[in-house]
Amino acid sequence: MADYKAPLREMNFLLHEVFEADKLWARLPALAETADRETADAILEEMGKLAANTLDPINRSGDEEGCSWNDGVVTTPKGFPEAYATFCEGGWGALVGNPEFGGMGMPKMLGAQVEEMLNASNISFALYPVLTNGACLAIDAHGSQELKEKYLPNMYAGTWSGAMDLTEPHAGTDLGIIRTKAEPQEDGSYSITGSKIFITGGDQDLSENVIHLVLAKLPDAPKGPKGISLFLVPKILVNEDGSLGERNAVNCGSIEHKMGIKASSTCAMNFDGAKGWLVGELNKGLAAMFTMMNYERLGVGIQGLGASERSYQNAIEYARDRVQSRSPSGAKQPEKAADPIIVHPDVRRMLLTQKAYIGGARALSTYVAKWLDLAKYSEGEEKQQAEAMVALLTPVAKAFFTDRGLDCTVIGQQVFGGHGYIREWGQEQLVRDVRITQIYEGTNGIQALDLIGRKTVANGGALFELFAADVQQFIDANAGNADLAEFIQPLTVELQRLKDATAAVIEATKTDPNAPGAASVDYLDLFGYVAYAYMWAKVASVANGKDEDFYRSQIKTARFYFARLLPKSQALAASVVAGSGTLMDLEEELF
Amino acid sequence: MADYKAPLREMNFLLHEVFEADKLWARLPALAETADRETADAILEEMGKLAANTLDPINRSGDEEGCSWNDGVVTTPKGFPEAYATFCEGGWGALVGNPEFGGMGMPKMLGAQVEEMLNASNISFALYPVLTNGACLAIDAHGSQELKEKYLPNMYAGTWSGAMDLTEPHAGTDLGIIRTKAEPQEDGSYSITGSKIFITGGDQDLSENVIHLVLAKLPDAPKGPKGISLFLVPKILVNEDGSLGERNAVNCGSIEHKMGIKASSTCAMNFDGAKGWLVGELNKGLAAMFTMMNYERLGVGIQGLGASERSYQNAIEYARDRVQSRSPSGAKQPEKAADPIIVHPDVRRMLLTQKAYIGGARALSTYVAKWLDLAKYSEGEEKQQAEAMVALLTPVAKAFFTDRGLDCTVIGQQVFGGHGYIREWGQEQLVRDVRITQIYEGTNGIQALDLIGRKTVANGGALFELFAADVQQFIDANAGNADLAEFIQPLTVELQRLKDATAAVIEATKTDPNAPGAASVDYLDLFGYVAYAYMWAKVASVANGKDEDFYRSQIKTARFYFARLLPKSQALAASVVAGSGTLMDLEEELF
């Protein structure tokens, strides 16, 4: 198994050459104070070292050992507590946090690259700080000043971690039917009672305290999603002076035995009249959760990207080292018993597929992160547009990066042949680990419904028009460049294909309530392939004319993407417009 | 997790209504003696019971416990030895064996259905008898009369099992570079020395003896694949009277820790001057192995089918039981908190995708098995044609069934949402188990190279023409049926698409040695989608006009296949004709 090497050159290229992050940071007052290119470079380099030297070495051992549960106490695998301490000492938990409460206030564009390295080296580990991050975002956006002051500094420091308690045994996708109860107390707090499952980092031995954000309903709350409130429920109560007090009635009843991410604790949590405090407004808990959803969902997408990159690095090394059979165009290393398998066209197809998907995802995640930063730090119309772009693109990033993440890790395993199936080589763990990213934080099917339904059909395609205009602007700006015609012409065709598919679903929905759901997953996939085409064309436009190897590699990968992967859009568009008939026609009992 | 139910209705429908197996059996003398519809029905029913009552119940526990190795001895999980004994008592090991040596001489068309049930209920278990079967086929086809008499009866009985020892640490795909040595002894036997890895069932505690078929080279053998010979090497030497004698110098050095099929022992085998006997001719060992390859490879394809069926049965049950959110067309079960998820269009898309791939694979495996039977039991031109069809279709079946097997098991896991990731629900095991089927017995990339290279380009498309003619004959025979036009018209288009793609690759190869490898995997996929279209059209042609639910379900599934899955052929054809340029252009160091 190859040692992990942070792809810093690719990240810097995207940040500064393709998306001109430093210019953006300089013109947004809040970011001008915290971020510049020099600081960003230093941060990426340091995280690269932490990932390679601290997190990568405990990834496979963490998978083998897994978490264990004993009488309510969760123990993480060997090396995890030490690595977590190192992570906290480096101040990494504060990276994108609010400076008012001890955060560093760094942009998401930078945070996205940091997250990729965290996830590439150790998804199980990454989940602990990533969930804390999400909880901090929700508290920062909706909590009272008192809650923020009391909890955020220790959470940014990592001394306390965060957990999101949404799912119940009977309520996953459909949170409207949760049963956890919150009863108002005289002191203004609430008594929380109920059971939650699938709680990532719900308990562990890394942090002194776990701050749960729990969805629950007041006894008299309206039925359904509009009766859900959000509560902050610490594992250990915090005294007035900020010191830890009594244990709250929050207990981890068991942990799940899973396909992968075995070093991440997935807890069943019991709240037995636990003391909690309202975050945001009563009955608006789901909306409060959605604040952080876009960050979290992009983060899950980046998990798919990270696993892909790790698998690719291993596959490249193996393909150069492993000798087997001869090149079809004649022996390339006649002095050896066979040629390295990287000479074989089909092995190259596999490696280039990984490389093209990874490059597309890294570019698109940086692009989405840019809109997230604009949504957070800009003003007026620009802010509104950014919020719209984030709303539209987030489900695409979450689902498409993770679906392609499964593809990439399966391909990276396939390059290894039989050795890919053996645990010691590490490739199969990446497949098992990445598989959860297609499921949690809203399954990819739910992301697709969100994209086509709430984000597209519900507004007559208004958000989509913003994205299409952005692509069109790029096309127009490069229309005169003959060097780029090989990308701009097909991108123009693909944009039209996506527009047609979008219009067709909007139209079909007028007479068929099943139309969005019937088209959803294929539509999201189509969107993803067109979005990657946009990204690769953008990358090619920046790399064009530069003679250095790195740029030539980008251009050649873009060509591969357009020739070999983008054609999938034809099939997807055909499925999107096929309608719901063949799906709904089969009687339930005839399945 | 649903209890496994053997899909007997589907099997009988394909065997007798679609492919008219009983008519075929009646006209082939060897099969007329052994097989008829009544016997076949009884056999399928019995295997259905064995699979459901004996093999399915130890599938998950077998995965949790796995095999263990201690000082050269392999122990299978709890219940496996007892299940193996039951399997042998039922005479299942003899099903397709040569009657001259104790086999039942049943057709592969029937054997294929039996294999599906074995694999659907327990892939790990199935591998033990399946490998024995393969070894018997090679011995029967190439061994001396003495070897056959000495080994086959006990192997058919399952008292002794078989193993195939091909791979070495440095030689997987490229068997030409194996190093295991065979030195001729004065008594006509050979002394075998070398190390083999990835030997399925190389050792276990199920059978009294393990008969290894080992690829090795004589000291003076030609280099490369033309210097490989095949040897029979028993774990325990067999005395003249057939009783077990001394232990041979064959030892299991360790077992692999794998992603899945954990109850199947995957052994590193050491041969230290072990006594072995030549099977077939010297230096023609690879050819001897290929005799059984077509059977084995179809069998591996059927593993993909079996896992898909098992995942589908679980997913259907879950989709009917799990209530979550409301149907987009209004509540279907208003008395409940939510509707069962089977009402949602995207859940139906997932289930129908499984159903359509499974039906396509089951039909195509029966079709290929029919050609295998004709190749084995018919004469003259019919036999030749059958051999050609088998050669062409086997790599398609192996790779396409297993690639779609991964798709189907991933989809079946996705239907379960978060529960799909948890081990106790069983869906994630199927993903892990089926993943090996894309790798072993020749990776799916190698199958694709075999299809486009040896089986197509090398003969100018002559074998392909046979298949195309068979499809065309079906099209012509049904051209006048207005009911079937919805299938026949698109099938005509797809056949032409496949013909064009085939011709394009043959043409490109004239000037580009990398052309076949560049097109291979996408070409095989294209072939698979067109072949399933042929199968679904055939199924529809038989189901057409029959009013029973079962037939209507077939027609509706065929419609779904044509509307939603078959469009992938457009994208695949575009990739096939894209050529090798974008694959070969990137310098190795720029990956």
Image (cartoon, coloured by chain):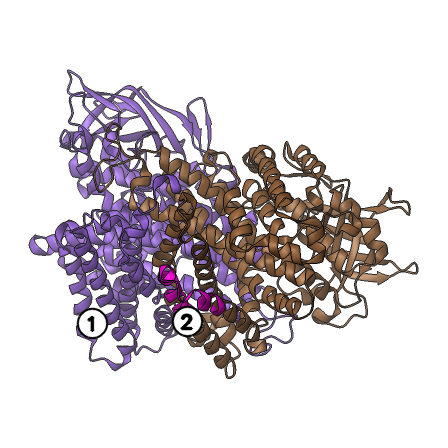
Chain colours: A purple, B brown
Q: Is A504 a magenta residue?
A: no
What x and y, as percent, mark residue B513? 53, 79
Q: Determine crowd level at label 2: few under 14, some 14-19, many 20+ residues with C-alpha closer than 10 A.
A: some
Tell me the magenta residue range: B472-495
Observer-nearest residue: A49 or B510?
A: B510
Residue wearing tag 1: A475
Residue at image position (58%, 48%) is: B113
Residue at image position (36%, 55%) is: B559
Q: Is B476 a magenta residue?
A: yes
User: Which mark is in front, 1 or 2?
Assistant: 2
| Residue A313 shows in the view | yes
Which secondary structure lies at badge 2?
Answer: helix
Q: Is residue A358 left or right of residue A166?
A: right
Residue wearing tag 2: B497
- Chain ID at mark 2: B
Query: Residue A88 falls in which quadrant of the image?
Result: top left
Query: Residue B530 falls in which quadrant of the image?
Result: bottom left
Q: Determine crowd level at label 1: few under 14, some 14-19, many 20+ residues with C-alpha closer than 10 A.
A: many
- Chain ID at mark 1: A
Q: How many marks?
A: 2
Q: Mark 1: which amino acid?
A: Ile
Q: Mark 2: which amino acid?
A: Arg
Check the image and name the residue furthest to the top.
A186
Observer-nearest residue: A529 or A15?
A: A529
Dot label at residue A460: none
